[in-house]
Every structure is written in structure tokens, then in C-alpha cells.
Image (cartoon, helix red, strand yellow):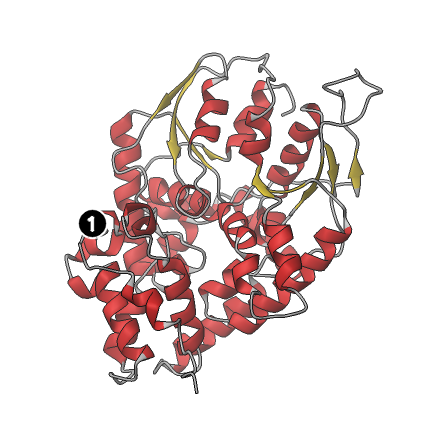
Amino acid sequence: MQKSVKIAPIDDFLACVHCGLCLSACPTYVETGSEADSPRGRIVMMKAIEQGETAIDAGLVRHLDLCLGCRACETACPSGVEYGKLIEGARGYLATRAPRSGRDRWKRRLLARWLPDAQRLAPLASLLRLASRLGMSRLSRVWWAPRGLRRLAALTPEVAPSRPLPAVLEPVLSPVEGPDGPPRATVALLTGCVSQALFARVNELTARLLVLAGYRVLVPRAQVCCGALLAHLGETAEAERRARRNVNVFLRAECDFVVTNAAGCGAMMREYGRWLEADPHYANAAKRLALKVRDVSELLAAVPLAPKHAIHARVAYHDACHLAHGQGVRSEPRALLRSVPGLELVELADGELCCGSAGTYNLTEPEMAWRLGARKADAVLASGAEMVAAGNPGCILQIRAALRLRGHDLPVLHPVEILARAHGLA
């Protein structure tokens, strides 16, 4: 009789040959220098849990909790270890088994209940819009304020008013037959949870750029959170439930592509096939949907659409972890930004090192998150950039906050916001 799997099949752990090439790519190892905070060190711990060779104590859980799940180690690994699959499996297994304080459990339950729900976040968005207008972010520079308050103030997003997107947006111009011809393709837009609540303007500009490029855009009303934030918190069953719902919704939309503008959402949806592979009713459908998922930059880069307006600025591009490592999308955002007249694109030192956002990480592990945020802010300032572009909502909030805590208010924008300006849409 086959032994039941706790985290992952044992062969998945044995793929790691402990060569150490992942070490310099791992943000927590770079910060602490501890083998226990490296990918191969965590693999040893997870393998011991899988084989029942270790007790699940606070020390072991601490090292696993400290992992950002950024998957930079996957990019560095010559053996093809699927580390993301392993750490997600561990978080699901440990969700009800890890020895945590009552405060920590309460925080995680609160995050799992509120963050992955755009409707529940809507009142918060209104409150944050008011806080932004009142200059809440300026508290981040008040030296005598408590550190926690300064960090919270720095994270205050700039929530712009937005209009609800229609269910269907027809293309402005057909690439084949002119204004009355067929669309380039039909795409369905994932609006997301945090994205829709705090970055609805990015969703609107994403849709308008796609329409300008000749795509027909659908905005399915019954869609839900992709499940990525729940997966970060180890809420595996609920993450899978959301995945099933979205498989139903987006396949019913009969689109050519599913487009995302949030790196974490795109990475999650591209892996729906793995998340639902054990479900006989959804396994094949989830794989079909996953093959349709594209980041907005991939679809826009496929269209020769020259921006008409110059943006004279030195822009640093930050590789969001789940875009670069989770989806392998690196060149397309850069190509789009370079197409903007007057824009000078600069690279950051250690550009693929995580900024510390990592889904819910900057809320569950604030100390390490802010260490990494400070490192990223220093890299931005050293580059001489006047603006930062990042293709993920969490990265935008984190980098903006880290810069504010350094006393700088540089614009940190999604690439579609910059492109929309260059095309006269914003």
C-alpha cells in the first residue's frame, strides 16, 4: 500500500542535489547567511517532515515561515527542483499543525478572510483613499512616531477613483480589416481581489490598452480571487475552491486568452492544472485554462503599436518574482517600456531579488520584509531612477513604502500606467 503524501512525493525532494547554486538567489539566505534559511536547507526540513523523521516544532516552522516563496531558487536550479510546489505543500500541511501563538493565528485567519475578497476590501479602499488625501503617508517621515505606525503610513496606497468596467469592450481597430473587422483575439480579464479594490485604475487601463491594440476584452462578472493569497497562507482547500470557480467562469467565457496584470495571480492561474490535478472533474479543464493565461505585457508586446507621447524619465524596472520566476516573463515589459519615446530604462542591482512583499509576507513577516524592502529601495536610489515600474500590486506598495521610509516619494507605477500615458489614455 502506497504511503500517503503529507507535502509532496519523496522523489520531488530527491531532485535537489544540494549543489548550492540557489544560495545567492535566495533573499533570506542573502540576509541571514543561515543554511536553515536557504532553499536546500528548507528542503531537508520538508523532506524530514514528509518521512516522519522530525517533530514539527517552533524552530522548524520559523525557518519555513521565513521563506518568501519567491521561487528565485527555481530559476537558479540546474536540476529543475519545483520548490514552489514543495513550499506550498508544506504550508498547506502545516496550516493546522504548526505551533503558533494565538495572535499569529488570528492575524492569518483575518488575512485569509478579508484580503482575497474585493467586495470586503471595498470599504477599506474608500478609507485608504481618504487617508491618502489627508496625507497619511507623510507620517512615514515623522522620526518620533512608532516604527509600526511609520511603516503602516508608508504602505498607504494611492487609491484613485475608478469606474466599473463593462462586461464587454470591443476593439477600437481590427489588425486585419480595419475598424469593422474581426478582433485580434478575445481575452478575458482577471480583475483580482486586492487589484480590483486598490488598483482598479490599473485594471481599467489594462482593458483600454488591450482594446487599443485590437483585442476584444471580456470582464466575467462571476470571477473570484485566483487563490494565490490563500495559498501563501496555507489555506489549500479554499485556494482550490476558488480555482474551480474560476475554471468554470473563464472556460465558459470562450476566450482565446485569460489576461492578468498581477504577477502572483498569473503565476497561480498558470498552475491551476497542478493545483487541481487530483480532481477527476476538473483536472483536464484546469490544464486547458492554464494554457490560456498570459500577462498583459505578453499580449501588448505582440502588437506593433507605437506610443505617440514621450515620457522623459529615467525608469527602473523591478522584476516581480512571480512574473520573472513564476511565469518566465522578463523581456516583454522591458520591450514595451523601451518603446516609449524619451524613456530611459535602467536595471537595478540584484534586480531579481525579492522586494519583500511576497503576497501576504510583509504582513506576516514584517521584519524580514522591511529588510528586503530597504535593500530594494537602496538599489533604486543608486540607479538614479526618477520612476519605478513593477508588474505586481504588492511590489508597487512595498517598493513605494520602502522609498518613503528612505525619505523619497518616487512614483512607483505598473507598466500599463506608463504605457497608457504614452498612448494618451491617462
Query: Which of the pair 422/33 is nearer the observer?
Result: 33
Q: On the rendered structure, is 138 left or right of 298?
A: left
Q: Residue at x 51, y 31 (%)?
A: 415
Q: Is residue 91 above or below residue 55?
A: above
Q: Position of residue 5 (x, y in %)?
A: 42, 78
Which amino acid type corresponds to the residue marked 1 in the rendered image? Leu
Q: Quadrant of residue 259?
A: top right
Q: Nearer the viewer, residue 46 or 353?
A: 46
Q: Is residue 344 above or below residue 399?
A: above
Left or right for 258, reference 6 = right
Above or below, 208 relative to 81: above
Residue shown at 42%/34% (left/top)? 330
Q: Position of residue 245 (x, y in %)?
A: 69, 62
**Category of crowding for the residue at label 1, using alpha-carbon neighbours closer than 10 angstroms: few (below 14), some (14–19), many (at least 20):** some
Q: Quadrant of residue 426?
A: top right
In x, y percent, where is residue 333? 47, 30
Left/right placement of residue 31 relative to residue 198 reads left
Q: Which residue is mark 1?
A: 21
- Can you give x and y, in whole percent of width and height, for residue 392 in the image? 48, 43
How many numbered marks, from 0 up?
1
Residue 406 visible in this rendered orientation of the protein: no
Foreground residue, 121 or 180? 180
Residue drawn at x 46%, y 44% is 327
